[in-house]
């Protein structure tokens, strides 16, 4: 990135199609992007839920050929991307359709990178390393949280180092995101809760990021409002209107963080996810209240706005006191969702904290946090929630 680029703010979004039943346009979208032969990237859980059969029906209705690639697990691995690229090239595919949560979508992005760029997936870790345009990508998210369907991020685990790599490039922004709230109706409650906490984390981190600006802030604040209003009900009742609210929360949070980037929660979460193969949303949920408490004095006015968006009555309160309500509100929400609150509950070992802190300090998401923590301060944050 040049010095000039460092001073510029950007705003990138894919084409977005949202609404109940929008899955039906997947074939039309793939066809419109010039596709003839689709690599359909998904995972066994989404197949079992029946959404892949539905998608195939709509691809066939457009006379599209397809190849299924379902060798994807939570926290997708480097070798799964490599196998997917091999299939894409052998079968002469020309468009990728990803149906699933963040893992199939990030795998699809990795496949796209290697299908048109040389080398290995490790070569693209960091910012703006992709030089060749990638194949067209259509995403159908089945969770409301990751924002991978509208973001220029891909997170892939480097199994050689047991580390999550962050790949950031406008080249991997999907072409079309089709968001059908009906796809969430088969999601287990605990995944609605943990992926929803990921969305809330995206919105808060993007809002206080050093790269936030007037095009990202309204999306962040609206996503915080929507998640505060809908996440608990979506988890407890699976009511379609609450699930729809969460799809918009996830969408707006995704748009915000893709353009404003993230912060210390994600910087601390990624090394944990790489080492222990834990659910990303669950780790964020545990880290969010303590990181907000630490970040508060560095972005007090913004956290006061977050408090208002979360429903704190602000009459007569000073910004400092309003901001202090945010970690309390988040903690109450996590308790009501029934999610774990300590890293030790997920099997994290205390002796790993020093090396995790070194990795978190260098994580790309730390660059846009309102305050740059040193390794000792990061260790302290991990220990506080251990
Ligand atoms: Fe995330």
Image (tube, rainbow, N blue to C red):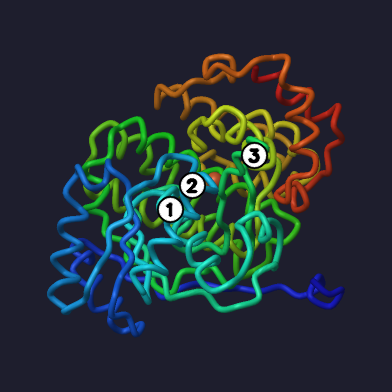
Q: Please tell me which residue is depicted at 60% across the width and 57% down the height of the picture.
A: 121
Location of mark 1 (residue): 249
- State yes or no: discs 1 and 2 in contact (Cβ < 8 Å): yes
Helix, strand, or loop for circle 1? helix
Q: Please tell me which residue is depicted at 60% across the width and 73% down the height of the picture.
A: 11
Which of the two discs, 3 and 1, labels the residue nearer the N terminus? 3
Q: CA distance from mark 1 to mark 2?
A: 7 Å
In this rendering, the answer to whether 24 lies above or below 366 is below
Which of the two discs, 3 and 2, labels the residue nearer the N terminus? 3
Helix, strand, or loop for circle 3? loop
How crowded is the residue under tag 1: few (<14 C-alpha within 10 Å), some, or many (20+)? many
Hey, which quadrant is residue 385 in on the image? top right
Location of mark 3 (residue): 160
Helix, strand, or loop for circle 2? helix
Of tags 1 and 2, which is closer to the observer? 2
How crowded is the residue under tag 3: few (<14 C-alpha within 10 Å), some, or many (20+)? few
In this rendering, the answer to whether 377 lies above or below 149 is above
Q: CA distance from mark 3 to mark 2?
A: 29 Å
Q: Please tell me which residue is depicted at 85% across the width and 32% down the height of the picture.
A: 375
């Amino acid at each position: 990135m040049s010095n000039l680029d460092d001073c510029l703010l950007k705003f990138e979004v894919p084409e977005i199609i949202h609404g109940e039943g929008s899955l039906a346009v997947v074939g039309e979208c793939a066809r419109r992007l010039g596709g003839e032969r689709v690599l359909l990237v998904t995972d066994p859980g989404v197949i079992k839920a029946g959404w892949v059969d539905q998608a195939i029906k709509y691809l066939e209705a457009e006379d599209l050929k397809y190849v299924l690639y379902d060798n994807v697990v939570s926290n997708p691995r480097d070798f799964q991307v490599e196998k997917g690229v091999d299939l894409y090239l052998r079968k002469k595919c020309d468009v990728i359709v990803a149906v699933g949560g963040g893992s199939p979508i990030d795998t699809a992005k990795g496949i796209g990178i290697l299908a048109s760029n040389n080398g290995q997936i490790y070569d693209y870790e960091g910012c703006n390393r992709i030089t060749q345009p990638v194949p067209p990508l259509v995403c159908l998210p089945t969770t409301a949280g990751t924002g991978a369907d509208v973001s220029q991020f891909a997170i892939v685990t480097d199994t050689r180092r047991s580390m999550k790599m962050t790949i950031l490039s406008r080249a991997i922004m999907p072409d079309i995101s089709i968001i059908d709230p009906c796809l969430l109706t088969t999601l287990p409650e605990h995944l609605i809760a943990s992926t929803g906490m990921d969305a809330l984390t995206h919105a808060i981190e993007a809002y206080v990021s050093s790269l936030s600006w007037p095009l990202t802030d309204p999306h962040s604040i609206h996503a915080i409002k929507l998640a505060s209003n809908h996440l608990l009900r979506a988890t407890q009742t699976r009511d379609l209107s609450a699930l729809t609210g969460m799809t918009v929360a996830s969408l707006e949070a995704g748009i915000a963080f893709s353009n404003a980037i993230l912060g210390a929660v994600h910087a601390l979460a990624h090394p944990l996810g790489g080492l222990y193969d834990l659910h990303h949303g669950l780790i964020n949920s545990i880290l969010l209240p303590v990181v907000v408490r630490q970040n508060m004095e560095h972005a007090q006015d913004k956290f006061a706005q977050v408090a208002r968006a979360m429903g704190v009555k602000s009459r007569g309160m000073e910004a400092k006191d309003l901001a202090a309500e945010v970690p309390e509100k988040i903690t109450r929400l996590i308790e009501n969702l029934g999610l774990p609150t300590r890293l030790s509950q997920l099997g994290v070992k205390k002796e790993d904290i020093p090396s995790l802190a070194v990795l978190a300090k260098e994580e790309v998401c730390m660059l846009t946090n309102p305050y740059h923590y040193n390794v000792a301060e990061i260790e302290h944050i991990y220990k506080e929630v251990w």
